[in-house]
Image (spheres, grey):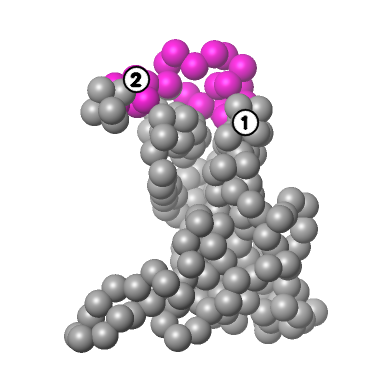
Amino acid sequence: KMQISVPEVMNINDEPQYIHDMYGTKPGEANFANNVLLARKLVEKGVRFVQLFDWGWDTHGDSAGNAVDIGLINKCRKVDRPITALILDLKQRGLLDETLVIWGGEFGRTVYSQGKLFPTSYGRDHHPRCFTMWMAGGGVKAGMTYGTTDEFSYNAQDNPVHVRDLHATILHLLGLDHEKLTFRYQGREFRLTDVHGKVIEAIVS
């Protein structure tokens, strides 16, 4: 089925203008917005897992965004519009309830500066203690925040979430029991959540 529809799915030229206006897409260019629209088209065709990558978030320097393609401000501007459009588009097509959208990165970032501080040049270091992700659709409660940090955004304070709890919850939202999903390795059954992990019921609708 997918082999037949690949050319159709990979072509965004036939999308109506209001969709291009929503996403900020530019047919023929390589950009994040185009990829987000392609993701929606894949979901419409029944593809069960779609993952998008976006480079340039390693902002040890130039968080102010002096360079055109990097910098935190520029990166946020490039992803916010198409991601918002994706959620609205999935909702208007009746697909959001059955599609889990997850946004995250490789780790957290400090809220304070790294290196010398200048008005137009500063960086943000890796932050292993606190990390923000968001999810939409797919059985997640809408309009809520789960967990807080201390006043310096350094330590998790209320409702800390371990990565195994996150994995258990995502698997639950996908209809899988993390305690039963195992793989055999060196003579025993292993789980993705090891011997830990609990579903965060407070965020499940």
Q: Residues within 10 Å of mark 2 (few under 14, many from 20)?
A: few
Q: Amino acid at mark 1?
A: Gly
**The image quarter in which residue 166 lies:** bottom right
- Residue 16 falls inside the magenta stretch: yes
Identify the residue under disc 1: 94
The residue nearer to you, when weighing 147 against 92, is 92
Q: Which mark is residue 8?
A: 2
In what element is the residue under mark 2? helix
Q: Is residue 55 left or right of residue 1?
A: right
Q: Report whether residue 76 is seen.
A: no
Determine whether 185 is above or below 41 in the image: below
Which of marks 2 and 1 precedes in the sequence?
2
The nearer-to-camera label among 1 and 2 is 1
In the picture, which quadrant includes the C terminus? Answer: bottom right
Q: Is residue 45 left or right of residue 96?
A: left
Determine whether 95 is above or below 205 in the image: above
Residue 30: % across, % down: 38, 33
**The image quarter in which residue 155 lies:** bottom right
Q: Which mark is residue 116?
A: none
**The image quarter in which residue 104 lies:** bottom right
In the picture, which quadrant includes the N terminus? Answer: top left
State the residue at coordinates (41%, 44%).
48
Residue 146: % across, % down: 73, 67
State the residue at coordinates (46%, 71%).
178
* Start-end of magenta stretch: 6-26
Determine whether 79 is above or below 24 in the image: below
Q: Amino acid at mark 2?
A: Glu
State the residue at coordinates (75%, 74%).
148
Q: Residue furthest front?
A: 180
